[in-house]
Image: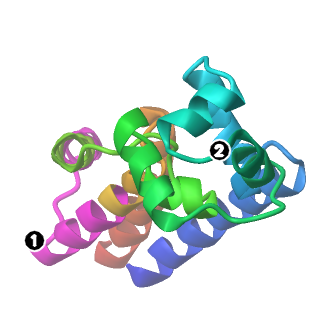
Amino acid sequence: MYDSITNVSNRIDSTLFDTIRKGSCLVSLGRRLAEVRRKAAINQVEFAQLFGVSQSAYKNYERDATEPPVHMLADICEKYDVNLNWLATGIGAQNAVNLKELSRRALIAVENHLNAKEVKLPTFKKADLMSFVLEYLMSHPDVSEKFLASIMETFVGDETNKQG
């Protein structure tokens, strides 16, 4: 089982690195700050005033010339429902995630997939699969059900081969 999850994780990680390498990821803190500001549809002066800094200081944050204070990042995340991990590091989903909703989605996806494949897993293996799917959803909440199914198919296929 763990080999399956490791293989799927490696495949997912390589896709993420390809995305970053191709430049479709906002890889600097300054670019992520600018993205949040643009989505809020306000200019640098207004954004700076909202968070109690000068426009020139804020401009330097967006240019990556200086780093903003952590309390400012936390305030931005709270005001605009942004994931602090994404804002600070670029990892994870841009918007804050709802753990209750993601847990529900993971449970339903696992149950539906196992029922559709007519696979009965021991409780501890089902729990491992559920944990893996939930962890993946926490950093990729917009992933399609089809992709989740492909992740689970790798796992379920390996378990079926072990049982048969």
Q: Is residue 48 above or below residue 119?
A: above
Tell me: 6 left or right of 110: right
Crowd band around label 2 with a 10 angstrom C-alpha radius: few (<14), some (14–19), many (20+):
many
Q: Residue 14 or 19: which is nearer the viewer?
A: 19
Tell me: 54 left or right of 52: right
Q: Residue 139 or 35: which is nearer the viewer?
A: 35
Determine the secondary structure under disc 1: helix
Labels 1 & 2 near each other (Cβ < 8 A): no
The location of residue 79, given as percent across then percent down, is 37, 37
The location of residue 75, given as percent across then percent down, is 40, 49
Give the residue type that dot 2 points to: Leu
Q: Give the main secondary structure, helix, strand or loop, of the magenta stretch.
A: helix
Which quadrant is the N terminus positioned in?
A: bottom left
Furthest residue toward left: 123
Whole-Å distance between the Cαs marked 1 and 2?
43 Å
Point out which mark residue 33 bears. 2
The location of residue 93, given as percent across then percent down, is 50, 47
Mark closest to the chain's N terminus, 1 or 2:
2
Q: Which residue is drawn at 52% across and 43% down?
A: 94
Point out which mark residue 38 bears. none
Q: Residue at x 58, y 32 (%)?
A: 47
Furthest residue toward top: 41
Q: Residue 85 or 7: which is nearer the viewer?
A: 85
Magenta-span inclusion, residue 95: no
Tag in front: 1 or 2 = 2
The location of residue 76, given as percent across then percent down, is 46, 44
Magenta-span inclusion, residue 123: yes
Point out which mark residue 123 bears. 1
